[in-house]
Image: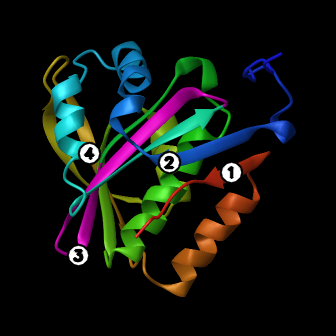
Amino acid sequence: MARPLPTPADDPGQLEVHIAHMRRRHLRGVLRIEQQVYPRPWTFGLFLSEIGQRATRLYVVARVGSEVVGYAGLFRAVDDAHITTVAVDPAWHRHGIATRMLLALARGAAERGCANLTLEVRMSNSGAQALYQRFGFVPAGVRKGYYPETREDALVMWANDIGTAAYAARLASIEQALPGRTVIEGDWL
C-alpha cells in the first residue's frame, strides 16, 4: 500500500522537502501553483524556454512526496544573479518552502561565480520582503508601476558579496533554523 502524501497539517519536524532542478515533468505542478498565485501567470512555453537555458538559468522545484509545492528561478548576467520568480502553493505557506528554495538559489548563484543577487518584490508584500531581508537583501530602489495588472510599484532589493564566508555562514544559520529535512537532488554546478 502506498504511503499517503504529507500534508501541511503534519508535524513540521517530520517534513522532508526535496529540492531539484526544474524539469519538463514538473511543469504541470508548477503551472498549477503559478495560476493560483499570479494574476498574469507564465505559460508552459515560457517555463520550458527558461529551463532550457542552463548556462544562464537556474530553476528549482520543491517537492513533498511526489507533489510540487513550490518553485523558484534566477538568471545570471555576468557576476550578478536576478531572482525571477519564487512561488509556493498557498496550502504550504509558512512551512519553510520558499526559504529552502532561496537557499538553493543563493548557493547555486555563488557556485556559478555570482557576487550579488537582486530581485523585485511588490511594495505590499511585507512577508516576502522580511524573508529576503533574512537573506541579506536590502532595498535599493523602486520601479514605479512595475506590475502591469495593478500598476503597483516594485521594491528593488540586492544582496551583495554572496561568495564570501560570511554569506555562507548566514545561509548555514538560516538552514539550521528550518524544521524537518531538506534533500538536495542532482548536480548543482
* Prevailing SS of the magenta stretch: strand
Label ID, residue 51 = 4
Of callouts 1 and 3, which one flags the residue occurring earlier in the amino acid sequence? Answer: 3
Structural distance between the alpha carbons of marks 1 and 2? 11 Å
Asked whether 110 falls inside the magenta stretch, the response is no
User: Is residue 99 in sight in this rendering?
Assistant: no
What amino acid is at disc 1? Answer: Thr
Identify the element where label 3 is drawn: loop
User: Is residue 31 in sight in this rendering?
Assistant: yes
Q: What percent of the width, then of the height, locates residue 57?
A: 26, 55
Q: Residues within 10 Å of mark 4 (few under 14, many from 20)?
A: some
Structural distance between the alpha carbons of marks 3 and 2? 23 Å
Of callouts 4 and 1, which one flags the residue occurring earlier in the amino acid sequence? Answer: 4
Identify the element where label 2 is drawn: strand
Residue hosting label 3: 79
Residue at 66 percent of width and 69 percent of height: 172
Q: Quadrant of residue 189?
A: bottom left
What amino acid is at disc 3? Answer: Asp
What amino acid is at disc 2? Answer: Ala
Of callouts 3 and 4, which one flags the residue occurring earlier in the amino acid sequence? Answer: 4
Of callouts 1 and 2, which one flags the residue occurring earlier in the amino acid sequence? Answer: 2
Identify the element where label 4 is drawn: helix
